[in-house]
Amino acid sequence: MNFPIPKQDRSAFVGELQRYVDKSRRDGSLLGVMLIHLHRVVELNTSFGYKVGDRLLAIVRDRIGKILRPNDSIERIGDHDFVLVLPSPKNVGHASLAANRIVNVLEEPLEIDGNAIKASVAIGIALFPEHAQEADALLRLADVALAGAIQSNSPIKICAEVPDKGTLSSFIIESELRHALMNDEFILYYQPKIDLATRQVCGAEALSRWNNPARGLVPPDVFIPVAEQTNLMLPFTLWSLNLAARQFGEFNRLSKNFSVAVNLSATVLYDPDVVDLINRTIKIWSIRPEQLVLEVTESAMMVDPKTSLETLNRFHDLGVMLSIDDFGTGYSSLAYVKKMPVNELKIDKSFVMNMDKDKGDAMIVRTVIDMAHNFEIAVTAEGVESQLILEQLAELGCDCAQGFYLAKPMPAANLIDWLQVSPWARQTGMRSVTG
């Protein structure tokens, strides 16, 4: 390893970052920028000399580099800062998960000239296009987030959303969300899930939609991020959960083996009251705990693994089913997930949709299924859009499937009709509500 690591000129790096931004704009993908500040380098240089400080920077960069994806890029910028570019993160939680991995990989002290030195970092994160549209603004906002992390003595800080003139202001969305919660403007759509062994419907995932009187159906990717950044996510989730539990009674009249899945965001997962509130919902609506599935994304679960494990264990004690959503898109592994009391992994649709054409995707799906089954965890594949992929999944031993080929998300009333006429449902021996 060569020392010291050359520093990138900030203005030159902005030009390099702009090329990443332009590509992300063309591809319609997200781009994460992460500023990583290494604490106490000045103090280290004073105590042990600049050579030790340079070696510390090099070792830190090497450790971080080993956990990055092939397309990620890390550069030294400034005396004790690095900038990490994350092309195509799935969401802000995905970027946060990468930051947590960096903090964790630096937990073990570094050995330099017989000295055990603990590397401590602060990380600021900003995303294109959510926070800024151009490279210089994106880097500046990552800098602001980094300053916030240092000031609050936190290892990680995500940029607060900056309203873009070309989009609906987050402040307007927040105000309208509060009004919507009070005026029952939200509805639930359900996407059925099929058991591949029996070819029978076995449940459905509840998906939120906002029926805004002025704008029509507002997609979740517009209002969910705002709800997560305010104090609205927990009441919104409780609304979703209670409506799903109430409507579940109608589905359960058609099939006693039906389960309904509700998504939990990171902000809700770490709320200290969430377990008691969900337990209360189960009792109010008299549903069997095992017929409620709580879906948590891989990235949300890994934001604070210790706390999430405690919360998931409490859910497990209630008897509810636990599912890890979007599996394969984050930085965790089955070796870690096996420690969690999870019942199901949902393979992200990005691996499933092209597995009939992409041998690499097919191998990833096969590997996840085999390893999950070794840990006695069921597997559901999302994004099934053809009979060929459905049969491939069945041959690989996948437990369940979900996707547009089987059924698109639909309102509760439509799901009740679908359960009585669909070939996937007719095989279940379901009886008509009126018969």
Image (cartoon, grey):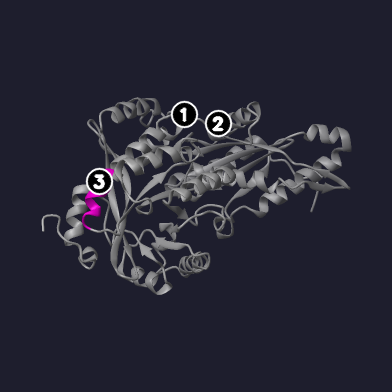
| Nearer to me, 77 or 416 | 416
* Count of numbered circles in the view: 3
Distance between mark 3 and mark 1 Cα atoms: 37 Å
Label 2 secondary element: helix
Answer with left or right where residue 412 lies relative to residue 296.
left
Res. 210 in view: yes
The reply to whether residue 219 is in sight is: no
Where is residue 228 drawn, in percent x and y?
Answer: 44, 35
**Along the line of sight, the residue nearer the viewer: 433 or 359:** 433
Residue name at image x 45 percent, y 68 percent: 362
Query: Which callout, 3 or 1, points at the residue further toward the start of the chain?
Result: 1
Relative height, residue 129 to residue 345 (above, below): above
Tags 2 and 3 touching, CB below 8 Å: no
> Principal SS element in the magenta part?
helix
- The amino acid type of the residue labelled 2 equals Leu
User: Mark 2, mark 3: which one is toward the viewer?
Assistant: 3
Find residue 107 and name its label.
none
Residue in the foreground of this view, choosing between 287 and 157: 287
Which residue sits at x=43%, y=51%?
Answer: 319
The residues bearing labels 2 and 1 have C-alpha atoms spaced at a distance of 9 Å
Q: Which mark is residue 141?
A: 2
Q: How far apart are marks 2 and 3 (CA)?
A: 43 Å
Q: Which residue position is annotated with label 3?
A: 247
Magenta residue span: 246-254
User: Mark 2 near mark 1, Cβ–Cβ under 8 Å?
Assistant: yes
Q: Residue 84 sits in which quadrant? A: top right
Q: Position of residue 34 (x, y in %)?
A: 59, 40
Q: Mark 1 points at which residue?
A: 162
